[in-house]
Image: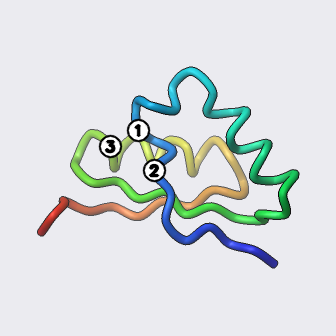
Amino acid sequence: MLIDSHAHLEMKEFDSDREEVIERARQAGVDYIITVGTNLALSRKALSLAHQYKNIYATIGIHPH
């Protein structure tokens, strides 16, 4: 089992191809992805992704604290 333990799928850079990125990871053998929120808004978006995809989990944080 492979787990990507530190991703930032919630960031705007993935807005245009997020689903494709998630699918490519799955095809490459990544079973689970942990996406890391770095502020309140991005943590909420990370949680939303975790609710949307069964293989994505979210962490919540305020960077760099």
Say if 26 sits above or below 17 in the image. below
The quadrant of the picture occupied by the C terminus is: bottom left
Task: Say what amino acid the circle numbered 1 marks.
Answer: Met
Q: CA distance from mark 1 to mark 2?
A: 6 Å
Q: CA distance from mark 1 to mark 3?
A: 7 Å
Q: Residues within 10 Å of mark 3 (few under 14, many from 20)?
A: many
Q: Residue at x 85, y 63 (%)?
A: 29
> Which secondary structure, mark 2?
loop
Residue 60 lies left or right of residue 18; in this view the side is: left
**Chain-order first, disc 1 or disc 3:** 1
Residue 17 lies left or right of residue 54; in this view the side is: left
Say if 55 sits above or below 45 in the image. below
| Residue farthest along the bottom direction in this orientation | 1
Where residue 23 appears, as percent x and y from the top left, is 79, 42
The quadrant of the picture occupied by the N terminus is: bottom right
Q: Are marks 1 and 3 in contact (CB under 8 Å)?
A: yes
Q: Identify the disc placed on residue 8.
A: 2
Task: Say what amino acid the circle numbered 2 marks.
Answer: His
Task: Say what amino acid the circle numbered 3 marks.
Answer: Leu
Where residue 48 appears, as percent x and y from the top left, is 49, 42
Residue where numbered disc 1 is placed: 11
Q: Residues within 10 Å of mark 1 (few under 14, many from 20)?
A: some
Say if 18 sits above or below 56 in the image. above
